[in-house]
């Protein structure tokens, strides 16, 4: 007598028969009416874009131990970042007496270092593993904070900002690659989303505490917050160098690899990667650089909104992300990530239109309310960006090239952080505020179109679609047991 199939195949056979007979539960909405034949005697069930959504309460339970350790330090580290993030220019200019123009050059130096190092860092990640590179970025950030805490000259500040450029330039691709190695594909989208929630929660807490504590008249308060920020990197370093030292890190080339030398040029010959990077670059251009630089500049110049009003707007942005991220994660689970990107782009069109509306009622409470609404609606779009873009990059990347793929994605954002503020400052500075809003709205519309075009190029699993188990057909048409 033939032995029965394993449990997974038994379940697939049962599911197939239920679907054929029309009995059982009603099919899930969103299942496409098409099938694919794979080889002789194999049948693949319909492709579903809305698979069963696991409850978010199961996230921690289902997470591998290494993933739990990795995410456990996010809030602590983000609180440290929030303590200093809003005050870099104030500290260097008003406390340390460095000319404002020089401060601008120093910040550009930091961004430039990050851009130059990100692609070599991607290759290094693939060569030695993301854990070590990630740890080195945290060490650089820790040392930079200590140097900044006691910097009194431009040269000292410049050296600290070079270290910041190295740290922030490679921390993203290194940490994303490590997450990709440690977290199974089916959990990555939720992991990146919850990680983003915790990051914003920590930055929000740190920003509130830092804003109430630091005082330009008391330079020692700035020294304190920079030292606390340095301290916030220690828990993650301890975990990376201790409990995670034996975690899945460097991935060897597969046995069937042809052994050809890997280069970024070779990777970019893949039309799927080029399409995804185009999507990421446009999303990057109309997202964070505009929120951090364009929105405040427009609000001040065209909306005549106070600095207090700006503070309320950024608070609204953080609150929306923290409150809605888990809800959004549950709603987008199993849906096409490109379609989620379309919804995100439309959401941002509303957000930037609200920013433009501030110029219709400048200097009024209504203008401030429009700005807060803009930041809040933009935050809703952010809850869709972080889980989908990072998950797509890591699902497309071969395991042994994850560092390079994440480095290219990070490069798109780094370039956007240079180009985005320049576009905003030129248009707003020349009194072309409405042209600036038109640029943002048009770019978001283009993003939606690009997402639909990219959808045709991405493999189903990269786009968040899961295929139902394929089942072999017995030769005699009967089900053996």
Image: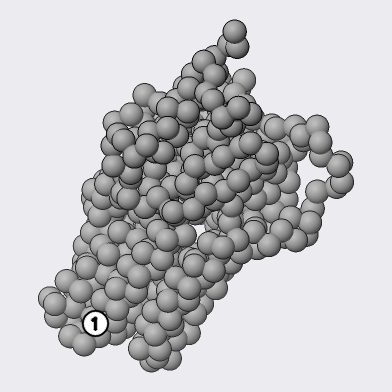
Q: Is residue 443 left or right of residue 475?
A: left
Q: Is residue 16 visible?
A: yes
The image quadrant of residue 341 is: bottom left
Where is residue 32? Give x, y as percent: 43, 53
Q: Which quarter of the image is occupied by the N terminus?
A: top right
Where is residue 226? Give x, y as percent: 42, 44
Tell me the colour scheme of the image. one colour
> Vertical placement of 111 versus 290: above or below?
above
Q: Is residue 182 left or right of residue 377?
A: right
> Vertical placement of 366 versus 333: above or below?
below
Q: Nearer the viewer, residue 438 or 454?
A: 454
Picture residue at 79% right of the left edge, 56% below the top: 266
The image quadrant of residue 291 is: bottom left
Q: Nearer the viewer, residue 49 or 174?
A: 49
Q: Is residue 415 left or right of residue 228?
A: right
Where is residue 468? Give x, y as percent: 48, 39
Picture residue at 52% right of the left edge, 49% below the top: 35
**What residue would you read off at disc 1?**
357
| Structural crowding at the residue carrying mark 1, measured as other residues with C-alpha within 10 Å and reported as few (<14), some (14–19) or many (≥20) | many
Picture residue at 80% right of the left edge, 32% below the top: 255
């Amino acid at each position: 007598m033939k032995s029965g199939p394993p449990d997974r195949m038994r379940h697939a056979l049962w599911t197939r028969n239920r679907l054929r007979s029309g009995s059982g539960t009603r099919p899930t909405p969103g299942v496409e009416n098409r099938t694919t034949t794979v080889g002789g005697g194999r049948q693949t069930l319909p492709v579903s874009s809305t698979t069963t959504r696991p409850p978010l309460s199961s996230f921690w339970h289902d997470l591998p131990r290494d993933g739990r350790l990795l995410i456990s330090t996010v809030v602590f580290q983000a609180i440290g970042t929030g303590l200093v993030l809003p005050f870099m220019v104030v500290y260097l200019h008003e406390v340390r007496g460095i000319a404002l123009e020089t401060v601008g050059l120093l910040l550009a130096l930091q961004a430039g270092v990050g851009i130059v190092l990100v692609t070599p860092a991607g290759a290094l990640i693939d060569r030695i593993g993301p854990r070590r590179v990630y740890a080195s970025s945290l060490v650089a950030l820790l040392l930079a904070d200590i140097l900044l805490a006691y910097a009194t000259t431009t040269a000292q500040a410049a050296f600290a900002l070079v270290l910041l450029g190295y740290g922030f330039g490679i921390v993203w691709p290194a940490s994303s690659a490590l997450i990709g190695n440690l977290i199974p594909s089916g959990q990555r989208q939720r992991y990146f989303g919850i990680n983003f929630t915790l990051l914003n929660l920590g930055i929000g807490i740190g920003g509130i505490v830092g804003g109430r504590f630091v005082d330009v008249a008391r330079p020692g308060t700035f020294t304190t917050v920079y030292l606390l920020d340095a301290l916030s990197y220690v828990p993650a370093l301890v975990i990376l160098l201790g409990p995670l030292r034996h975690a899945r890190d460097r991935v060897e080339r597969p046995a069937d690899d042809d052994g050809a030398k890997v280069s970024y040029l070779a990777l970019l010959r893949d039309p799927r990667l080029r399409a995804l990077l185009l999507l990421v670059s446009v999303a990057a251009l109309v997202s964070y650089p505009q929120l951090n630089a364009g929105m405040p500049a427009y609000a001040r110049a065209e909306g005549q909104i106070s600095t207090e009003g700006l503070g309320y707007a950024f608070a609204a942005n953080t609150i929306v992300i923290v409150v809605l991220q888990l809800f959004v994660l549950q709603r987008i689970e199993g849906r096409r990530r490109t379609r989620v990107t379309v919804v995100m782009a439309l959401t941002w069109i509303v957000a930037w239109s609200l920013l433009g509306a501030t110029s219709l009622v400048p200097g009024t409470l209504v203008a401030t309310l429009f700005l807060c609404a803009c930041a809040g609606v933009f935050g809703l779009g952010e809850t869709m960006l972080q889980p989908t873009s990072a998950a797509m990059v890591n699902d497309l990347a071969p395991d042994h090239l994850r560092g390079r793929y994440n480095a290219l994605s990070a490069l798109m954002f780094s370039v956007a952080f240079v180009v985005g503020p320049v576009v905003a400052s030129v248009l707003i500075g020349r009194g072309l505020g409405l042209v600036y809003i038109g640029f943002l709205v048009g770019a978001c519309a283009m993003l939606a179109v690009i997402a639909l075009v990219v959808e045709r190029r991405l493999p189903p699993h990269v786009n968040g679609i899961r295929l139902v188990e394929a089942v072999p057909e017995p030769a005699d048409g009967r089900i053996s047991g």
